Image: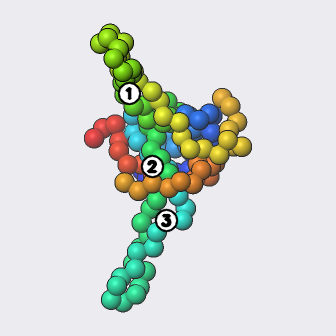
């Protein structure tokens, strides 16, 4: 299985579709990094040769639905705590909040390193963790 695919559709601020599916070995709960095309060049200090490029990561998404040739991916959810000062314990509940992806809102069609660039259709995604690990 290739590890690099692309975003083909943005559903909303939490959900997008990539062009990899069960035919590519993708499973529910696999994780993909969304890559910034720029990256940072790594230069050898002695030879001054560019020895590689360090990927910049826009965000990480998790596969929630798998089809033959595509997968639906969602942003991560985080547990937050309601911290009302001087509130009784029963009001200090924990809740799960799904984080928004930093997408280009003009491309919403419905249905370690960090980049501040907006997520767009055509961005490469890289498999970083499979559900089988």
Give the secondary structure at mark 3.
strand
What residue sits 43% from the left and 35% below the top? 76
What residue sits 59% from the left and 35% below the top? 13
Q: Residue furthest front?
A: 86
Q: Which residue is mark 2?
A: 33
Numbered tag placed on residue 80 in the rendering: 1
**Residue 28 seen in the current view:** no
Give the secondary structure at mark 1.
strand
The answer to whether residue 86 is left or right of residue 104 is left
Numbered tag placed on residue 39 in the rendering: 3
Frontmost of labels 1 and 2 is 1
Quarter in which the C terminus is drawn: top left
The correct choice, above or below, for 55 with respect to 83 in the image is below
Numbered tag placed on residue 66 in the rendering: none
Q: Position of residue 77 (x, y in %)?
A: 42, 31
Gap between marks 3 and 2 measured at Cα: 13 Å
The correct choice, above or below, for 117 with respect to 16 in the image is below
Q: Position of residue 26 (x, y in %)?
A: 43, 40
Q: Position of residue 119 (x, y in %)?
A: 58, 48
Q: Position of residue 52 (x, y in %)?
A: 41, 73
Give the secondary structure at mark 2.
strand
What residue sits 42% from the left and 66% below the top? 54
Closer to us: 84 or 101: 84
Gap between marks 1 and 3 measured at Cα: 32 Å
The correct choice, above or below, for 80 with respect to 101 in the image is above
Task: Write down the quadrant of residue 82 in the picture.
Answer: top left
Closer to us: 20 or 37: 37
Q: Residue furthest bottom?
A: 47
């Amino acid at each position: 299985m290739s590890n690099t695919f692309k975003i083909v559709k943005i559903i909303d601020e939490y959900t997008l579709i990539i062009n990899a599916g069960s035919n590519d070995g993708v499973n529910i709960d696999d994780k993909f990094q969304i890559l910034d095309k720029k990256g940072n060049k790594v230069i050898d200090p002695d030879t001054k040769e560019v020895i590689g490029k360090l990927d910049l990561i826009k965000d990480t998404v998790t596969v929630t639905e798998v089809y033959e040739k595509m997968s639906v991916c969602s942003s991560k959810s985080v547990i937050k705590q309601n911290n009302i000062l001087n509130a009784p314990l029963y009001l200090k509940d924990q809740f799960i909040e799904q984080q928004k992806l930093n997408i280009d809102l003009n491309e919403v069609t419905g249905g370690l390193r960090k980049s501040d660039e907006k997520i767009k259709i055509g961005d490469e995604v890289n498999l970083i963790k499979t559900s089988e690990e």
